[in-house]
Structure formats: structure tokens, C-alpha cells
Image (cartoon, helix red, strand yellow):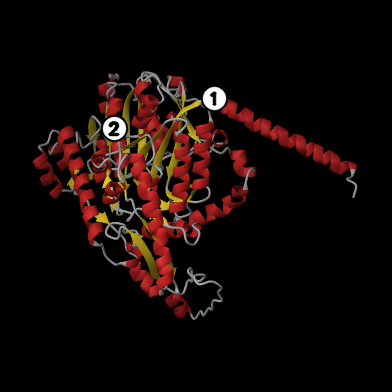
Amino acid sequence: MATSKTAKVLLILGGFAFVFFIVGIIALIFLADRIGRPSVPNNSVLVLNVSGSMPDYVAEDPIMKALGGGSQQSFTGLLTQLRKAKVDDRIGAVLLDIKSPGMGWGKADELRDAIKDLRTSGKPVYAFMELGMNRDYYIATAAEKIFVPPPGDLWINGFAAEATFYKGSLDKLGVEADVIQIGPKYKNAPDQYTRKEMGEGQREVINAVLDEYMSRITAAVSETRGKDPGEIMTIIDNAPYNAVQANEMGLIDGALYRDQVFDELKTRLGYREEEDLRTINGSKYRDVSSDSLSLNNGERVAIIFASGAITTGSSSDGVFGGQMAGSDTIVKAVNDAANDNGVKAIVLRVDSGGGSALASDLMWHALENAKAKKPVVVSMGDYAASGGYYIACNANKIVAEPSTLTGSIGVFVGKPVLAGMYDWLGITNEYVTRGKNSGIFKATEKWNEDERGKMMEQANTIYFNNFVPKVAKGRNMTDEQVNTLGQGRVWTGTQAKANGLVDEIGGLERAIEIAKELANLPADKDVRRVVFPAPQPLFQRWFGSEDATLSSDLKAKKAIADTLPADVRRSLRYSEMFERMSPGEAFMLMPFELTIK
């Protein structure tokens, strides 16, 4: 059917309109970049909000920014803000507004180190908390002064570790977990579904972790607040304290409201009494590029983020919270960085408790190939355990924070048995099979003796023929040494270094320094940190893949998920991860999701 002249004209005009639209957006980006660069007055105070979920990394999108959209603050973004403030002559001081940040104790250590590094510039760093919990106060102790408003409280009353079990709920639903675990004492991930209480191994590990964390917060308070270590336990045992009490005890530097803290800063920075304190918030200061401060210049070092549960497929944000590190995404990023002659070294940032054994091995293989071309250094965040340790073990160097949870060298396989739930619902089913073990994934029956033997053989192969030898090779150990440290046992970064599972204590910046050394780059010159894969632009998200068609559906699911209680979201995150994995995939997963309050 011939196209009419009117239709052709409309098509041409529509094409021109679309081109002008794209050109206009691009022009808007450049204009917004020039106009939107914040003016930072001299002797300003940078006010950084240390709160919210704070994922390890969130890509900046210049197009969304030009259109008025913001981006979520990330943990590594916060570290960048502190790096910039250290060298920016216009910033006279930094005020940390701490409100229950969503980070673990490993990142809390890393943030404290970044604060202390900023203070070496001579610039004062103050911390303000309305309600100071353990982790909030631990972070704040790195600051020069700590303030809490008069009606505020300090809840430094020790640690409580919570481990959740779902067997009781599964029993009511008629669901039974049939599992095989290598490292039965410590590989306790299946215990969430097979027990109603902690086993001996899990209790032993959690107590060791709490002892480590307690010693760290005790040492931090003792060092920064001038307290005798023996006095700290008495202080903790008698907590909580209101702001006035905390001030009298020397735990904080004043029971002051926010405006009074501003007055303190005015005095410290030499303002005249009639002057207003000049402040700039973190969201605006993000628009100050590192390049403009002579940071992030020089040879290129690739930074690759492996955050969240490890799965096959592409990386994504989970519907029920958290992130997922997909093997397709990470492998491609590693390969691209390895094949880029302009990239001198690779830093893999791991913040994961593990997941799919298959996906972990695919990532390990890509990193092994990359290591033959250029140095590979791993930086561990809050977690780098089980599958998270698997992908790290072959790096040239591994860097972890003292409170990082790592190790958990072990594996398990399992399946849910739904016979009881089917009976409860009145569902009946039949299987017609060919092959002796063709019914190995039957949802209504536990493994028989032959099937269990086959699954045990699979698990043993993954653990003894893959995981243990690869760790042994990467860490220059014998298989026997690794197996002794393995069995699913979780170690803190301090313990892991003592056992030879990591090389150095430190964060991402220390990992970058080591990468420079291994790549023979000048120690006194900065490097350009380049994230792989490159952040996906807005137009690619709109037009580039099937993800665009799913975005509205995903947002709707996320909106519903956000209304659920935190414990429910946590259990559903596991279900979401299991759903993405193929039947028969083995798990390399940290033996517990530990909540320490």
C-alpha cells in the first residue's frame, strides 16, 4: 500500500522533531553542566548527610541530572566527597550529619579511616547526631568533636546479633528443605530453613565476630575520648545516656542544637559575629568534579563493583532491596578492562555474601585471565564471603577492613520439598520419567539414596576440586591448609589477615595504592578511576534493551515491596535470588545474614 504524501511529510517532520529533541537534550546537558556547577564560597562548611541505604556504588546520570532528577548517595560517593574536601581550599570544615546509615561495620571502618585522612589536612571535622546508636557513634569518634542536641540520646549499649530462622513458618506451610552442605559445622546457610535455633558452629562464629567488634569500638572510644579501656565496658553496661549525661561523661563535646553547632563552627573558622555560616550540602558538592580539584587525573585504573548476591545473568537491583551481581555483567566488565590497553590495573570491589557457585566460578575465570595481562587487586567491603571470597581469592593482592566478614569457604545444594503444602492446598501431581535420576528435582519428594549420592558428588566436586584448590593456588597454601580454614567458617578481616586469607588491612583507597605499585605507576601521582561497565545512559535505558520495558513493572513491584516489614523483605531477597538460579546450581553463600545492633 503506497504511503500518501501527507503521511510522508508527517514522518519527515516527526524525524526532524525527534532529532531536535535529542540535540536539545544534549545542549541542555552541557548548559546544565556549566550553569549547575555550584559556587563554593571561601571558608565554607561542607555538610554531609551520612544516612539512608547507601549502596556501595551508584552511577551518576548527567541526562537525568539535567532533567532535574537526582541520584541516590552511594558509599563510595561519600568517600569521594571527603577526598575532594581534603584538597579543596574553599572548604574550611566538614560537618557530618549522622542518621543510622545503612552500612555494615566494614564500611564503618573504611569511613572512619577516610575521616581521619581528611583531618590530616588540618580541617576540623565535626559530627552531629540526634540519636547515636553503636555504629553512628563509632563513626563519629573519628571526628574532632561530637555533638548531640539536648533531647537526643546515646545508645552505645553493646551489641546484639540477630539470626533469623524460617523453619517454623515452612513447617506451617508444609515445606521442607532437603539440603547437603560441605562444612556442616560452619556452613550454616541452610540452617535458616532446616533449624529453629543456632547450631554450635554458628554460635561460635557469631561470638567471635562480636568479640572482635566489641574490641574495636572499645579501642576507638578509648583512643579518641581519652578513656581507660577498662572504663569503657562500665560505660557500655550502663548505657543509654541522654545528651547531657553523655556530655558530662566526656563521650561527646556538647549537648547542642544544630544552630549552636553552626555557631561553634563560626568561632572555629574565624567568622565575625554578624556573619552567617557559609555552608554547602553534599548533594550540591557532588557537582564539583574531582578533575577540577586535580584529583582523578593520570593513568587509568579500572574499578569494578561486585555488589550483592552473586547470580548468573546480568547485574540488577533486587525487587526486595539490595543489589545482585550478575556473572554476565561482571565477566564482560573484567574482560573489557583487561583488553583495554589504556587501563593499567584492575581493582575489584567485592561487597557480597556469595550466591551461585557457577556464577562465582565464571567471574573467577575472567579474573584469572585478566591477571595474566595486568595487576588485579581486590577491595572488600562489608562482606566478601563464600562466593564473594571465591571471586577474590586469585587476585594479586586482597585488602579488607578489620570488620569485613570474609572466608566462608564452603558449598551447599538443596531443594524445597512441597509435598506437605500441596496436600494442604489439595493439589495432586504425577511424574512420568525416563532415566534413573530424571526425577532428581521433583518438588514433592526428598532425594532418594541414589539421588542424594549424586548431589553429594556434585557438592564435593565443587568444594574439593574447585573452591579449595583455587583458594590454595591464589593464596599460596596447600589444600589441607585451606580446608582447615574453610568448612564454611566466617572470619573477620583481622582474623583473615592473621590466617593468610587477605594481605592487608584497608579500604578502596589502599587497594588503589597497591594497584599503582603493582602497575609501576608513580606513588606521588593520582590515577583516573574508571568504572567498568560504564554507567548506562538514560536513552539506552529507554530504548536499548528489554530492561526498558520492564522498568515500570519493576518500579511497581519495588513500591509494593517497600511496604513490607524488613524481615519479610530479607527472606524474600533470598527467594528472589533462588528464583534466578537454575535447578541444580550449588550455593556458595554466607552461612547467615547477620544483623548486629
Residue under the point 15% across and 47% down: 236
Mark 2 or mark 1, whichever is nearer to me: 2
Left or right: 69 in relation to 597: right
Residue count near mark 2 (Cα–Cα under 10 Å), binned few <14, some 14–19, many ≥20 = some
SS of the residue at dot 2?
helix
Amino acid type at circle 2 is: Asp
Residue 243 marker: none
Quadrant of res 176: bottom left
| Among the two numbered marks 2 and 1 on one chain, the one whose residue lies closer to the N terminus | 1
Front-lying residue, 531 or 455 = 455
Measure the C-alpha gap from mark 2 to mark 1. Answer: 34 Å
Residue 413 vs 304, above or below: the answer is below
The location of residue 324, given as percent across then percent down, is: 46, 49
Give the residue displayed 82% in from the left and 41% down from the top.
10
Tell me the tag on residue 113: 2
Q: Is residue 100 visible?
A: yes
Query: Against 219, is 579 above or below?
Result: below
Residue that appears at 47% across and 61% down: 584
Q: Which percent across, then down, holds residue 489?
A: 28, 52
Residue 35: which numbered mark, if any? Answer: 1
- For image coordinates 31% across by 54% down, the residue present is 488
Residue 221 or 206: which is nearer the viewer?
206
Q: Neighbour class for label 1 at 10 Å: few (<14), some, many (≥20)? A: few
